[in-house]
Amino acid sequence: MKNKLWTREELILALNLYLQIPFGKIHHNNPDIIHLAKMLDRTPSSISMRLSNFASVDPYHQERGVGGLKGGIRQVQPIWDEFINNQEELLFESERLLAELESRTLEQKYPELSNLSENLKGETKTREVKTRVNQNIFRKIVLVNYNTQCAVTSINIPEMLLASHIIPWSANQEERLNPSNGICLSAHFDKAFDKGLITFDEKYKLVLSPSLKDYSTKDYFSTWFQRFEGARINMPQKYLPHLDFMAWHRENIYKY
């Protein structure tokens, strides 16, 4: 095993993993930590310690008084700051590095990239690849944050869950990959949220649009909508939906 200073690339890969596993599982027996340790030729304990270092600079844990391990803060703080200020570039770079370590191309790691039009070339194709990869990693982060279950219905079938953007991808480039701009919703609630048929108030309670209530005589309305009205979402493990983002959704997407 190596016993040397961590490189920037290794720290980026550690941050990638930190964002995708719950705080309570950043221990050396976690299979994902063991996997990364093998690829980096390091011990699982060293990976676990680096993840705890990232926890020490994560504002979520700072606000709730969890310190993490502060010994390596000088190494991880610049990487965390880079993530906050340039999420798209750093997350994409981390996935590219991870694919290289796994001796795969991004196209092999993400088969959906093969669906890109053959007419896409140069910078246009590079931009589309980056978008697809970053959307994929955003979904992973959001689903983990909600324990892989819908924030409204508690449905926990991964294939039925989406990482719903509160402020849409196209509306705010800076917040596209902010975990606090995502909420895990099952497919029909994702569509309803996207179209402004539902929203959430300042206490994270579900609000139904008056236009949705036009269907109140239908059986599915009481089963799939009315029963959840006014219910508070299943709260995420760490990154709460930002209240400013929720207010933006109510003001710009929700149909009054």
Image (cartoon, grey):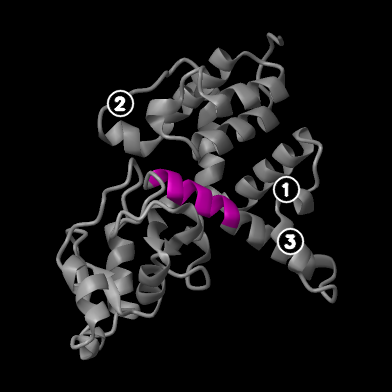
Q: Are marks 1 and 2 in contact (CB under 8 Å)?
A: no
Mark 1 or 2: the one toward you: 1
Q: Find disc 1 in the rendering and name its residue.
A: 109
Which label sits on residue 170?
Answer: none
Q: Residue furthest front?
A: 219
- Judged from the image, the secondary structure of the residue bearing numbered disc 1 is helix
Tell me if residue 227 comes above or below residue 108 in the rendering. below
As shown in the figure, which amino acid type bears the numbered disc 1?
Lys
Q: Is residue 176 left or right of residue 189?
A: right
Report crowding for label 1: few under 14, some 14 to 19, many 20 or more residues within 10 A (C-alpha).
Answer: some
Residue at the image position 27 percent from the left and 59 percent from the top? 243
The C terminus - image quarter: bottom left
Q: Which residues are magenta?
A: 136-145
Tag 2: amino acid: Val
Task: Please give left or right for residue 1 compared with residue 64 in the image.
Answer: right
Q: Which mark is residue 113?
A: 3
Question: Residue 171: percent from the left, percent from the top?
Answer: 48, 73
Q: Position of residue 238 (x, y in %)?
A: 34, 41
Q: Residue at x 42, y 19 (%)?
A: 70
Main SS of the magenta part reads helix
Which of the two discs, 1 and 2, labels the residue nearer the N terminus? 2
Task: Identify which amino acid the numbered label 3 is placed on.
Answer: Leu
Would you call the spot at circle 3 few (<14 residues within 10 Å), some (14-19), or many (20 or more)? some
Q: Which residue is mark 2?
A: 66
